[in-house]
């Protein structure tokens, strides 16, 4: 009997069920905390943290959501979060696509060195550069009362630009786009050059349409990271409370004196802030998985 005619072993026949079981257990472990967050947002005073712990609230009501809207200026927080996230996502896609195309398909002196420097930026955590970024914004010349020497005022720290400037360019985004663009055949680009197309036309007409899956993946990752950014938003909001975003505003609810009452209200605020990310991921899930597979991201 040849190897093709041999029946599969019981282990191989049972492996799909084992794999499905592992996936199901993982899905439950990841879903339970979110479900607990949602259930806790409906709990009344004294219910959260009560022993023995109750997963379901004693009664469902919207009092915590009304309290969250009353305690926080949610329209302002939403506007700041949406504006900052949209600007950072658009800028990251634009700069990553242009830089990725240049590093993948153009030949110029120092290209490999620049790419290595881009990779080096991914080795350091983002918060390591927050203090230098903040000092640069404080001493920005001719802004916020500063003179030409960058002193005398608050610089850009009191403006909306402070929320987005450190995140307008992403080393990870450049790397991701470059790795995908490398796979585009050079023959297609050379044929377009022979027809008289310039580099910008090549990027816009050929590269951008083919990078749609990985661009959507990068957009989703950037959107989630920017939407949930807390440390930098907290640092900026100390200079201008009008720049406060949703994560910072919800965290401030902990400063109230009644933790038994405020924890469920915080949960309600977290549910509200999570909905845009959840809806966006559900709509882009197919493109996200495809982009991960095509880009070779492990």
Image (cartoon, grey):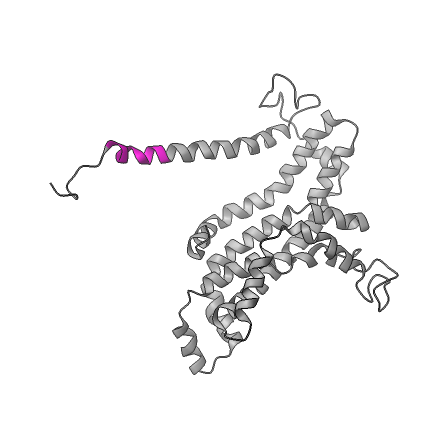
- The vertical placement of 53 against 292, above or below, is above
| Observer able to see residue 22 | yes
For this rendering, which residue is in front, 290 or 148? 148
Q: Residue at x 51, y 79 (%)?
A: 198
Outermost residue toward the top in this view: 52
| 259 sits to left or right of 287 | right
| Observer able to see residue 98 | no
**Residue stretch in magenta:** 10-19
- The vertical placement of 202 against 7, above or below, is below
For this rendering, which residue is in front, 269 or 121? 121
| 258 sits to left or right of 282 | right
Q: Quadrant of the N terminus?
A: top left
Residue 166 image offset from top left, x and y in percent? 68, 57
Residue 103 image offset from top left, x and y in percent? 52, 68
| 15 sits to left or right of 252 | left
- Marks counted in the figure total 0
Residue 16 in the magenta stretch? The answer is yes
Q: Residue at x 57, y 67 (%)?
A: 114
Q: Residue at x 75, y 38 (%)?
A: 252
Q: Residue at x 64, y 42 (%)?
A: 273
Outermost residue toward the right in this view: 152
Which secondary structure is most common in the magenta stretch? helix
- Looking at the rendering, which quadrant does residue 163 occupy? bottom right
- The vertical placement of 151 against 54, above or below, is below
Residue 156 image offset from top left, x and y in percent? 78, 59
- Looking at the rendering, which quadrant does residue 154 occupy? bottom right
Residue 82 in the magenta stretch? The answer is no
Residue 24 image offset from top left, x and y in percent? 42, 33
């Amino acid at each position: 009997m040849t190897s093709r005619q041999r029946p599969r072993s019981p282990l191989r026949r049972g492996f799909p069920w084992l794999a499905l079981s592992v996936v199901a257990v993982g899905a439950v472990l990841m879903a339970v905390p979110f479900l607990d967050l949602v259930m806790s947002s409906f709990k009344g005073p004294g219910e959260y943290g009560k022993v023995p712990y109750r997963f379901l609230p004693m009664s469902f009501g919207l009092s915590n959501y009304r309290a969250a809207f009353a305690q926080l200026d949610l329209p302002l927080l939403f506007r700041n979060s949406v504006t900052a996230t949209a600007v950072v996502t658009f800028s990251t896609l634009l700069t990553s696509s242009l830089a990725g195309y240049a590093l993948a398909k153009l030949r110029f002196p120092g290209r490999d060195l620049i790419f290595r420097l881009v990779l080096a930026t991914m080795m350091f955590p983002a918060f390591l550069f927050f203090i230098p970024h903040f000092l640069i914004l404080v001493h920005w010349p001719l802004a916020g009362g500063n003179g030409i020497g960058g002193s005398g005022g608050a610089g850009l720290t009191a403006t909306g630009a402070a929320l987005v400037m450190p995140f307008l360019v992403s080393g990870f985004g450049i790397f991701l786009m470059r790795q995908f663009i490398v796979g585009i055949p050079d023959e297609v680009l050379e044929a377009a050059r022979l027809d008289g197309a310039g580099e910008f036309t090549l990027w816009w007409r050929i590269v951008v349409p083919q990078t749609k899956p990985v661009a959507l993946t990068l957009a989703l990752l950037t959107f989630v990271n920017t939407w949930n950014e807390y440390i930098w938003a907290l640092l900026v909001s100390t200079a201008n409370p009008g720049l406060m975003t949703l994560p910072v505003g919800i965290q401030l609810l902990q400063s109230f004196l009644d933790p038994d009452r405020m924890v469920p209200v915080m949960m309600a605020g977290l549910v509200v802030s999570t909905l845009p990310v959840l809806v966006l991921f559900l709509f882009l899930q197919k493109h996200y998985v495809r982009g991960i597979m095509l880009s070779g991201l492990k």
